[in-house]
Image (cartoon, rainbow, N blue to C red):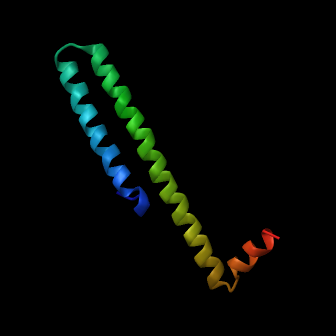
Amino acid sequence: MNVLEQDRELAEKIWGCGCLYLDYARVAWVNGQLDEANRWVEEYRRCRRELDELLRRKREHDQLAELIATLQERGINITAIIGKGNE
């Protein structure tokens, strides 16, 4: 899963819960318990939103790392720029 290393364990738990909730929804659906199925689908959607947020954070991190690498290739010292911004 393409998430930050510190988010990997959480992402795996969220993914596992999402899979489980879809299974619960399917069982409720098959048994004609539509309200219960909807409840589990909503829980899955919550998991999906949380996982999407972790994936978004990784994309932003990668974009920033790419920007920093590009600046360094061009000889721009990013630490000097950041240091001046804190004065």
Q: Nearer the viewer, residue 86 or 35?
A: 86
Question: For the point 22% across and 19% down, which residue is it?
Answer: 29
Percent x, y of residue 62: 51, 65
Looking at the rendered structure, the number of numbered marks drawn on it comes to 0
Give how far across and how far down residue 4 sits, in percent: 44, 61
Q: Is residue 67 left or right of residue 39?
A: right
Hey, which quadrant is residue 24 in on the image? top left
In the rendered image, the vertical position of residue 60 relative to residue 84, given as above or below = above
- Give 16 or 56, whichever is nearer the viewer: 16
Going 29% across and 39% down the picture, which residue do you hit? 17
Q: Which quadrant would residue 43 be assigned to in this image?
A: top left
Residue at 63 percent across and 82 percent down: it is 72
Which residue is farthest bottom?
75
Residue found farthest to the front: 87
Residue 9: percent from left, percent from top: 34, 54
Q: Could you tell me which quadrant the C terminus lies in?
A: bottom right
Q: Position of residue 18 (x, y in %)?
A: 31, 38
Q: Is residue 44 above or below residue 4?
A: above
Given residues 43 and 87, the one toward you in this image is: 87
Q: Is residue 58 above or below residue 37?
A: below
**Residue at figure coordinates x 35%, y 33% from the top left:** 44
Quadrant that contains the N terminus:
bottom left
